[in-house]
Amino acid sequence: MSIKKLLSLSAIVVLLGIFIGLDSAYASSFMSNADRPDGAETKEGTEETERRIDEKDKGRKGSIYDAISFMIAGGHYKDNAISRRDFQTNSGVNPATGEAYSDATIGRELQSSLRAGLLEQAANGDYYLPAGINQDVLDAINAEVGERIITRKEAGTDSALGLKRYNLTDLGPAKLDAIRAIVSRSSLTGNQNIQTIVFPASFAEAHGETLLEIVGSLRPDQQAIIISETGKQLNVIPELQTRIDAQEILLVPVQPGTPVATQFAEMFRDQNFIGFEADVDKIRLSIQQGEVRI
């Protein structure tokens, strides 16, 4: 067996199988009186917020959590930035009006996300996600913000609101800085519990520059992997192909129709890349049973 195949097999042995993701399951929401000018949340606004959470309105409610989830689902990284107008038009409607959110609401939402480090802005004014943010990361950030900073409980639950319904511009500089620090250490490259960053072939082909940006910021103990269909020829930018050829990024083929392939499809359904820890025994069993082929 070639050295390259041995390295790929080693990668699988520490990689594939059943994955321990970061806890997620946070409902999304925002201040329902969000069209008021920026400022401290009023008692009336708080009551209205809780009422709308209780109503369980469908669709995006205008929260920072919702906004970033929309960005993640759309793959809005640096090479796929989105304008403010397109974000306002396409990211959902205000359940109170049935129409797109107002300019004031969108402005506060985007500015809060920028201030928290959850968004970045291109020279032309468009918005995009930092390379190390995905849905698992957002859920982890939201959980810590709810535990430490925005602790007020969601109406009728034991869960804190966190980023689910809050205008971060209402917070003081110290709390905003604390949220930004959480974002930084929770990213794929900042989270000490993530040793592997996995990408589907489709992400490598569509977002090669973003993938390279992530790879360039990896810690020495982290490894980037591209999961590809067995026999598939990748169509990636030359710089990325050079990293693959040098095995700085490992390419792991997975046979279509196998349980492992199904697991990967589920992992990548709601986001374009993920970091995870692997169950080594399950991985070895998958290899022994021929569910992963090299």
Image: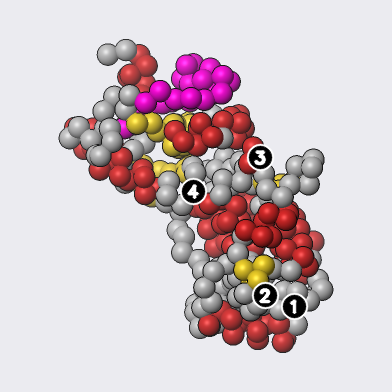
- The stretch in magenta equals 232-254
- Give amino acid for label 1: Glu
Sequence-wise, the earlier of marks 4 and 1 is 1
Q: What residue do we see at 37% from left, 49% from top?
A: 266
Question: Helix, strand, or loop for circle 3?
Answer: helix
Sequence-wise, the earlier of marks 3 and 4 is 3
- Give amino acid for label 2: Met
| Marks 2 & 1, CB-CB < 8 Å contact | yes
Q: CA distance from mark 3 to mark 2?
A: 28 Å
* Numbered tag placed on residue 41 in the rendering: 1
- Give amino acid for label 4: Gln
Residue 272, horizontal then vertical, whole percent? 49, 44
| Marks 4 & 1, CB-CB < 8 Å contact | no
Nearest to viewer (mark 1 / mark 3): 3
Q: What residue do we see at 49% from left, 16% from top?
A: 246
Report crowding for label 4: few under 14, some 14 to 19, many 20 or more residues within 10 A (C-alpha). Answer: some
Q: Does residue 248 appear in this view?
A: no
Let me know if residue 119 is in the magenta part: no
Sequence-wise, the earlier of marks 3 and 2 is 2
Report crowding for label 2: few under 14, some 14 to 19, many 20 or more residues within 10 A (C-alpha). Answer: many
